[in-house]
Image (spheres, rainbow, N blue to C red):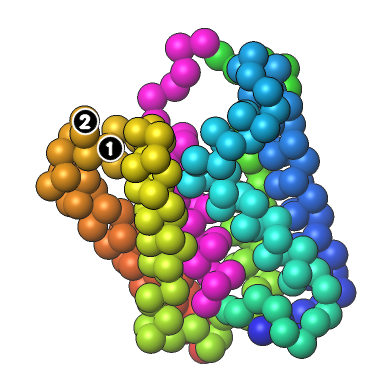
Amino acid sequence: MFPNLTRSARRTALLIAILFATGLAMQLAHLDAIGGEPFAATLWDAARSFTVLTQVLVVISLAIVSRPLRAGVSEPWLAALTLAMILAATAHHLAPGDPVPLVGLGFWADHALNSLAPVLLTIWWLVHAPKRRLDFADLPMFALWPSIYTAYVFARGAQDGAYPHTYLDPVVTGSGTVALSVAGMLLLFLLGGVMMVSIGHYANR
């Protein structure tokens, strides 16, 4: 848990949570404006995205961290969530760009959520987050959220036949390819977990 954070660290965590929340609100407003669907449908469709759901978890987790509570967010969970945000933002920037450039609200929301906020979160974790007790026994935590998300995507896809990415669609790519994609994704998170735990060990020197 996080009982010993300084007031400035908690305030900074709250500001980052507010930045993420503002970016999410701007993005949903942008999607609602261009989608032509009821807002509930826009929200439900956005909730299919790993990045969006991870950003929501970041908002909740940092809001908890910003309060001096005895029971709150564990060190492994916040490290895993920070890694998930780093990987999601990296994937966003490596993906092929939209042929129609974002403008206005969409442009600012995209840069806030996928550039500025992930960088600030990473810096906050490196500078403020307790990480000295991270251990390699915590590695399953780094695969927990991606595993839950994958199960959620398959459950939704089984109902409506829609998947956020073709590599997760068993109809398009085949079950074997999907299984390999999921295994590769989880391996990436575990390797990233090794990096995060190693940083924690280095910080303990």
Give the residue displayed 48% in from the left and 57% down from the top. Answer: 84
Give the residue displayed 50% in from the left and 52% down from the top. Answer: 86
Q: Position of residue 82 (x, y in %)?
A: 55, 61
Q: Looking at the image, is 106 positioned above or below residue 197?
A: above
* Res. 195 in view: no
The answer to which quarter of the image holds residue 168 is top left
Dot 2 surroundings within 10 Å: few (below 14), some, or many (20 or more)? few
Q: Position of residue 180 (x, y in %)?
A: 18, 51
Mark 2 belongs to which amino acid?
A: Val
User: Alpha carbon of mark 1 to alpha carbon of mark 2: how far?
Assistant: 6 Å
Q: Which residues are magenta?
A: 76-100
SS under mark 2: helix
Residue at label 2? 172
Tag 1 and tag 2, C-beta contact below 8 Å: yes
Apparent side of residue 101 relative to residue 176 in the rendered image (left or right): right
* Res. 93 in view: yes
Q: Looking at the image, is 104 positioned above or below residue 79?
A: above
Which is more toward the observer, 131 or 162?
162
Give the residue displayed 44% in from the left and 22% down from the top. Answer: 97
Give the residue displayed 68% in from the left and 65% down from the top. Answer: 61
Apparent side of residue 178 relative to residue 59 in the rendered image (left or right): left
Residue at label 1? 169
The answer to which quarter of the image holds residue 127 is bottom right
